[in-house]
Image (spheres, helix red, strand yellow):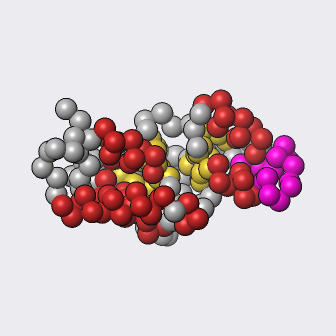
Amino acid sequence: MPMPIQGATKISKIMTKKLETVGSSSSAQEVAIKMRDKQVSSIVVMDDRYGIPLGIVTERDLARKVCVTDKNSTQLLASQVMSFPLITVNADSSSSDAADLMLKNKVRHLLVVSKDSNQNMDKNEALEDKDLIKPVGIITATDFIKFSVTADTDSDKDVNEDKKTEKILEYYRNDSNHS
């Protein structure tokens, strides 16, 4: 039985578990080719030295930072076209929390991290351990839509959560709101 979208639905049930990544020194062209070949709308950019996630390159980033500027995609690095800071959500977070993060930050992609990740690191601490942030997947606006289409609409949903989900879907229909 499909699960209804509601605030109690964990992101781990909705997210895309296959996370595509590139190194920060990859060219924008390499990023675009990998996105095409893997049929994904975004790729997480990883630090070449430490293997930690730095940012994300989306189709929109490529369009706005490469195509319309007429820059050579073989000369631009992933680190130059990526969006950052990288917005993350814990895999155990609710779909409602993730949706709120997307709306607040005006993004369509959130990196999903494991509960072992240290998201509340003291600002004075140096980022030395590459395992501080453990990516386990990605959640996109499309994932929410796919989940809502397959959800059992006859089950008992919380009315407020239904309205919030509908608000999110409506917000994402207006494509001009997002980078």
Is 12 placed left or right of 86 in the picture?
A: left
- What is the number of callouts on the image? 0
**Chief secondary structure of the magenta span?**
loop
Please tell me which residue lies in front, 10 or 165: 165
* Residue 2 x %, y %: 23, 36
Q: Check the image and report above or below for 72 versus 84.
A: above
Q: Check the image and report above or below for 156 versus 107.
A: above
**The C terminus sits in image quarter:** bottom right
* Residue 10 x %, y %: 27, 47
Looking at the image, the residue that sits furthest to the left is 156
Please tell me which residue lies in front, 79 or 179: 179
Q: Which residue appears at 23% of the width and 53% of the height?
A: 6
* Residue 121 x %, y %: 42, 62
* Residue range highlighted in magenta: 66-81
Q: Which residue appears at 80% of the width and 58% of the height?
A: 68
Query: Does residue 101 belong to the magenta stretch?
Result: no
Query: Does residue 68 belong to the magenta stretch?
Result: yes
Is 54 placed left or right of 106 in the picture?
A: right
Q: Which residue appears at 64% of the width and 37% of the height?
A: 35
* Residue 117 x %, y %: 39, 50
Please tell me which residue lies in front, 158 or 33: 158
Residue 165 visible in the snapshot:
yes
Residue 115 visible in the snapshot:
no
Asked which quadrant contains residue 101, the reply is bottom left
